[in-house]
Amino acid sequence: MKKLNNDIWHSAAVQSNESEVHKDVKTKFAWCLTGSGHYLKESLQLLDKMPETDIFLSKAAEEVLPMYGYPLDFIKRKHKLFRDKTYSSVPVGALYNKSYHTVVIAPATSNTVVKCALGISDTLPTNMFAQAGKLNIETIVFACDTEPTVITESPKEWVELKPRKIEFDNLSLLKKFADCTVVETVADLRMILNQRLKHFGLNWIEFSS
């Protein structure tokens, strides 16, 4: 597992010091899905075990999920689902009511990363990111284009991609945002989620065999 950036360690320290304070908080996680197929399966496996979590889909995510064998009925099994059906991203209003303590975008396409980094909010996930930032709500972004060579699973085959310099520049810019933790591996995503769960006195959902 690659070394985490300093923001993750800082976030972990803060959470450790305040873990007892927030055990009675009744708000939820907001998990945003974008149009990324890279690490989609692994992200959904973590999402499937998350308690107190609502799901927010981009239009691209709604198209991509069935391509990878995940119909919306599968996604709605355990979590409330919000779709990108309004021009003003109406579901984002739940952030103003303090319904969510953490926004997760996983996996995040390079398109989502650059929009978040440049302050563009024209999809449900990027609107969630922007408004969470304005409300000082913690955000976790699992960026996918983080290595010189990326081997990713398309709906029909495995593909080798080589992210460009612009992708890495946008990633570096996003890492500078306050209240935002950028993770680059599944292991790091699970670790930071585990820290947030403990922070709010929650546990992973375990399924009996």
Image (spheres, rainbow, N blue to C red):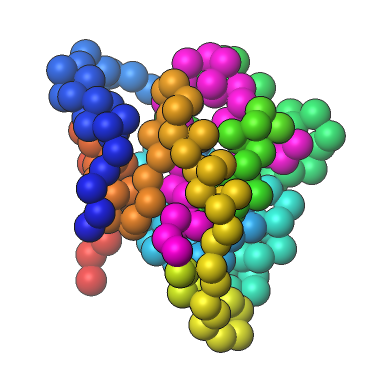
Residue closer to the observer: 21 or 160? 160
Query: Where 79 falls versus 52 (above or below)?
Result: below
Residue 159: percent from the left, percent from the top?
54, 80
- In the displayed structure image, the side of residue 88 where residue 199 appears, left or right: left
List x then y, in percent, for residue 35: 64, 58
- Which residue: 62% across, 42% down? 114
Q: Is residue 120 left or right of residue 107?
A: right
Q: Quadrant of residue 182 in the image?
A: top left
- Given residues 175 and 102, the one toward you in this image is 175
Q: Is residue 136 magenta?
A: yes
**Residue 78 picture location, percent across and down:** 46, 51
- Residue 159 drawn above or below residue 108: below
Which residue is at 34% across, 55% downward?
Answer: 185
Residue 11 at x, y percent in the picture:
27, 27
Q: Is residue 54 left or right of residue 52?
A: right
Residue range in magenta is 122-148
